[in-house]
Image: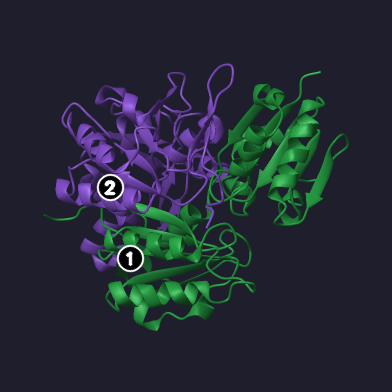
Chain colours: A green, B purple
Amino acid sequence: MTGSLVIAGLGPGDAALVTPEVTQALARATDVVGYIPYVRRVPARPGLTRHETDNREELDRATHALQMAEAGRHVVVVSSGDPGVFAMAAAVFEAVEAGPKAWRDLDIRVLPGITAMLAAAAHIGAPLGHDFCAINLSDNLKPQALIEKRLRLALEADFAIALYNPRSRARPDGFGHALDLMRQICAPSRVLVFARAVSTPEEEIRVARLAEASPEMADMRTVVLIGSSATRIIARDGAPFVYTPRSVPE
Amino acid sequence: MTGSLVIAGLGPGDAALVTPEVTQALARATDVVGYIPYVRRVPARPGLTRHETDNREELDRATHALQMAEAGRHVVVVSSGDPGVFAMAAAVFEAVEAGPKAWRDLDIRVLPGITAMLAAAAHIGAPLGHDFCAINLSDNLKPQALIEKRLRLALEADFAIALYNPRSRARPDGFGHALDLMRQICAPSRVLVFARAVSTPEEEIRVARLAEASPEMADMRTVVLIGSSATRIIARDGAPFVYTPRSVPE
């Protein structure tokens, strides 16, 4: 009995952003595994078992998925966004490396998805239109000092920056520290985009200059985009456009 | 007559990676505009005019698209990958900002797509599974000194890094310089992934340690992924998996 394991990205929320490749993998799955709200995005149907797990149980979830694939099931691990960006793909490969040798020979595939920063950028213009970074502000899995070092060097390099997981109830202060650091390095006119619940009915996108930004503008459903020093706002009736020019003059 | 302008990402090549949102936009377009090979990915049909333009004419192409939208056409500007990542979205907004005031009130939308680095990462495992950067190595639009500064700071910050446009016939040396810089900062065991023509029938993915890497491993169809210092190779029969763990220990 030959099973398979697919780690699939569901995109940020809108069904029109799920790739056909992912839709096809879900159609042939026997089991879907993931964090509760993501699993619930996959409609129930006969022959499909949906395994909902709590957050912060990524390694257990990955191990369970691998065991089912080994037993011959067709398992899809679902992530929001792209599974390779602060999501389940790395957790599955950690489990593969630590697990029995036979797991390395399983049919394992990662299917990319639209990650939050790219959907957020698209919905406001092209703020990541030049070199950029993605930094996870959560200190669950890395030291706060490393977060600050990376953010400082990324600002010195004048990248546009996407901040994932900027702030949560358990970590109310991280994003405030990031703003403090930005104020040491960037001009008060630096452009920020706060994109909340992108591509869902609750989507809310707010543009602010650094001088007006405050920690409360971000929550656990927000991705924050920090422009480079060249990022521009195009004012218009309604929401502005924000973009980063392709050129940097000599 | 109310026209519209959509800047759409076709993904890296495979039709199964084109989002339904983009497919719908193409179905209602009167005009498709873009670089020749991307426009040819959109099938001809009655009522659709396909405007093929050469590379390096991004601003002219953007202006033409805006003029047609202003005249009431439904125009889709197509990019490979994601239009906000080293592609057409920024060029369109440059043209909007420089153009007549009326262009700001046009119905302009950007539709995200699967960008090459995320498809490449998915096809080899999860090498971008932690904080990462995207750097365009082309010096067409920015000074070489800025490229080297950004790469140096990104390596010091220990990001995983995706290099777009690492090498072309017109720029044979840029990627060699990048390798030289990496050799000053990184251990010889640093993991690199050379992903060529991702998700097309010509896809070729090669994993190499820095000590074995050479400039010829990259060409204009390659995206190069540089692991962080923590990136690991899982050996197996056939192609290995490459991933970056989610955690960085204190």
Give me the residue at 53% from left, 24% from top: B240
Please, what is the three-letter code of the amino acid marked with disc 1? Answer: Arg
Q: Secondary structure at mark 1?
A: helix
Say whether residue A102 is left or right of residue A231.
right
Q: Nearer the viewer, residue B75 or B204?
A: B204
Q: Which residue is mark 2?
A: B151
Is residue A104 positioned above or below B185 on the image? Answer: above
Q: Nearer the viewer, residue A7 or A115?
A: A7
Residue carrying label 1: B104
Give how far across and how far down residue A78 sits, in percent: 68, 44
Q: Mark number for residue A106?
A: none
Residue B81 placement: quadrant = top left
Sequence-first tag of 2 and 1: 1
Q: Is residue B35 visible?
A: yes
User: Which chain is indicated by disc 1?
Assistant: B
Q: Residues within 10 Å of mark 2 (few under 14, many from 20)?
A: many
Q: Locate the N terminus of chain B by quadrant.
A: bottom left
Q: Answer yes or no: do the residues labelled 2 and 1 have beta carbons within 8 Å? A: no
| Disc number lying in front (2 or 1) | 2
Residue B180 at what x, y percent from top left? 22, 36
Q: Is residue B237 above or below residue B114?
A: above
Residue drawn at point x = 82 percent, y = 26 percent:
A71
User: Pointer 2 indicates a residue of which chain?
Assistant: B
Quarter location, residue A44: top right
Q: Is residue A126 visible?
A: no
